[in-house]
Image: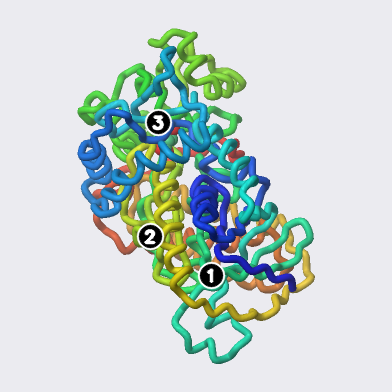
């Protein structure tokens, strides 16, 4: 078995993982980044449309207030303080000064600002409607040029290595729970490598693909959460799954995100009868926090028997719309909707996990030398519901603080990094039909029973289905050769069970976790399409 040794192993090459690589390498550490696809696909941050919080007339107290209010007053205050304290500087130094990301500017060269749900002012910078792509294409190129960073594409983390489980030295069984890297599958050759590291950083993004309808990229099933939980790390707040209120939904068409910025620029939510139903729901109307908008839409769908509502942006000029939202305009047009002339059909879909692997503000999890950053982590920043356009900012801040703390640890500490056991894998090729079918069952169970509005009966049913499936999948997993789809399935069922477990244990409706009262209608709308778009 090939073994690689490095200071830091980063699992995931989205904004959090790549920013960590930048900060750590600048501080003199060697870094290996692994990602399952090539760099230009895979990560959710690549597809972020809206933007990132940054404001030259910065009012930290107001931002803090908005984050806490959006969270339904559940955010962990020190985590909010860290974001508002370090966020401005991280955007300025990495994204503006170092990478020169092409954010939209006015004729005088000043940054343009937009607003999204839950924000009390215009404080979000953006690059048209492809902010994530604009940031990551510059960052990827930059990370590839760093001398002490090695990026290995086509590599999927299988399991974390710990001293107690994987060391060849039997005495290590008695050491405290400590991570020393990961086994990774090379999808090009099918071989397994051991990557041994002083620090292992989980930056695998969220878990949206465990739901039928989602804005997340294929394969985003909570890999980091499942792997961390398997070695005994604490995971928290997993009941708080944020559903994005507005995902394009039309019969026989793929789903894709219609950014909240469309509402920020004047788009209004209306139902099929043309009523602006948000006007009576919240003082911020169509720009209320996401959980409130998503539930209001859900109730419209149930009470009117419709499968979508609409965003109407036709009050803005066609030139403005095409210039500000070129990608959304093109994609909607491809599926027969000219958004300059007609409303956009939308419905909610799973978008963001506010919970994740417990981590402190320096990325440290409950397992020694295992870090989690970005969406994979949960510092309590978002509490029960995330404020729009804070996720990219969190990636930068958590990457920076974690790298800085890791360099101190690495300089100060002695690391015991023994050889690990060989990986043995059966030769049997897994049946892709079984994998696909199991995946469908996970996604439909989560969509129908663990969606926007939950009940204890449905959570109970979901748990039974998933537990049975988990047993089947474990057996299937141990009898077959490892493939990327088999690893997805194994982690998807684990993450789904963790979400169901967290939701079942929490009877209190807060933010994104809403438990139905009495005989409230809780059906999830029928999904229109199984295909997910990039
Ligand atoms: C959006 O553009 O609506 C998504 C941005 C986010 O999730 O913060």
For label 2, count other residues whose C-alpha is less than 10 Å away and answer few (under 14), some (14-19) or many (20+).
many
Label 3 SS: loop
Q: Is residue 298 left or right of residue 189?
A: left
Q: Which residue is mark 3?
A: 305
* 2 vs 3, front mark: 2
Ligand 1 shows up in which quadrant of the image?
Answer: top left
**Regarding mark 2 in the picture, which secondary structure is present there?**
loop
Residue situated in front as seen by the camera: 455 or 420: 420
Looking at the picture, how far across and down is residue 456, in whole percent? 33, 58
Any mark on residue 529, and which?
Answer: none
For residue 67, above or below residue 200: above
Q: Is residue 33 above or below residue 62?
A: below
> Measured along the vertical axis of the image, is residue 441 above or below residue 48?
below
Which quarter of the image is occupied by the C terminus?
top right
- First along the sequence among labels 1 and 3: 1
Q: Position of residue 326 (x, y in %)?
A: 54, 20
Q: Which residue is mark 2?
A: 362
Q: Secondary structure at mark 1?
A: strand
Label 1 vs label 2: CA separation? 16 Å
Specify the quadrant of the image occupied by residue 506: bottom left
Q: Tell me, for residue 198, which label it has, or none.
A: 1
Residue sitting at x 73%, y 73%: 425
Other residues around mark 3 within 10 Å, as few (<14) / some (14–19) / many (≥20): few
The CA distance from mark 1 to mark 3 is 55 Å
Q: Is residue 16 left or right of residue 30?
A: left
**Residue 443 is at least partly visible in this image:** no
Marks 1, 3: nearer the viewer: 1
| Image spot of residue 164 (x, y percent) | 53, 83
Q: Residue at x 59, y 40 (%)?
A: 530
Q: CA distance from mark 2 to mark 3?
A: 47 Å
Residue at image location 31% in from the left, 26% down from the top:
122
User: Does the image show residue 311?
Assistant: yes
């Amino acid at each position: 078995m090939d073994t690689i040794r490095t200071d830091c192993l980063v699992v995931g090459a989205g904004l959090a993982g790549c920013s960590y690589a930048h900060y750590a390498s600048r501080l003199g550490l060697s870094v290996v980044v692994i990602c399952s696809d090539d760099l230009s696909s895979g990560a959710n941050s690549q597809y972020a449309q809206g933007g990132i919080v940054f404001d030259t007339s910065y009012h930290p107290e107001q931002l803090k207030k908005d984050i806490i209010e959006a969270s339904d007053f559940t955010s962990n205050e020190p985590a909010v303080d860290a974001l508002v304290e370090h966020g401005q500087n991280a955007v300025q130094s990495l994204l503006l000064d170092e990478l020169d990301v092409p954010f939209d500017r006015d004729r005088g060269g000043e940054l343009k600002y937009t607003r999204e749900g839950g924000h009390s002012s215009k404080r979000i910078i953006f690059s048209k409607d492809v902010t994530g792509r604009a940031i990551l294409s510059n960052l990827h190129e930059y990370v590839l040029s760093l001398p002490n960073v090695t990026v290995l594409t086509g590599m999927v983390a299988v399991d974390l290595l710990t001293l107690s489980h994987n060391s060849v030295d039997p005495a290590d069984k008695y050491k405290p729970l400590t991570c020393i890297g990961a086994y990774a599958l090379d999808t090009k050759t099918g071989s397994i490598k051991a990557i041994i590291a002083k620090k292992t950083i989980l930056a695998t993004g969220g878990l949206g693909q465990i739901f039928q309808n989602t804005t997340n990229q294929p394969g985003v099933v909570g890999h980091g959460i499942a792997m961390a939980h398997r070695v005994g790390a604490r995971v928290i707040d997993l009941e708080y799954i944020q559903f994005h209120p507005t995902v394009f939904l039309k019969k026989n068409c793929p789903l894709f995100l219609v950014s909240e910025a469309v509402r920020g620029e004047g788009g209004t939510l209306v139902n099929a009868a043309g009523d602006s139903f948000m006007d009576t729901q919240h003082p911020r109307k169509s720009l209320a926090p996401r959980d409130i908008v998503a539930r209001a839409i859900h109730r419209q769908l149930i009470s009117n028997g419709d499968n979508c509502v609409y965003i109407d942006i036709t009050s803005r000029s066609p030139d403005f719309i095409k210039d500000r939202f070129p990608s959304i305009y093109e994609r909607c047009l491809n599926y027969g909707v000219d958004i300059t002339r007609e409303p956009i059909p939308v419905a909610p879909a799973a978008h963001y996990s506010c919970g994740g692997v417990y981590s402190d503000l320096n990325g440290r999890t409950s397992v020694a030398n295992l870090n989690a950053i970005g969406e994979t982590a949960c510092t309590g920043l978002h509490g029960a519901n995330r404020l729009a356009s804070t996720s990219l900012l969190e990636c930068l801040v958590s990457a920076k603080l974690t790298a800085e703390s890791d360099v101190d640890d690495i300089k100060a500490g002695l690391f015991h990094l023994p050889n690990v056991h060989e990986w043995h894998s059966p030769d049997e090729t897994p049946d892709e039909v079984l994998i696909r079918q199991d995946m469908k069952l996970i996604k439909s169970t989560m969509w129908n029973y663990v969606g926007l509005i939950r009940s204890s009966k449905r959570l109970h049913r979901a748990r039974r289905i998933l537990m049975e499936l988990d047993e089947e999948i474990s057996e299937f997993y141990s009898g077959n050769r490892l493939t990327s789809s088999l690893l997805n399935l194994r982690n998807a069922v684990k993450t789904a069970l963790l979400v169901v477990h967290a939701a079942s244990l929490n009877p209190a409706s807060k933010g994104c976790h809403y438990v139905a009262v009495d005989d409230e209608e809780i059906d999830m709308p029928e999904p229109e399409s199984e295909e997910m778009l990039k």
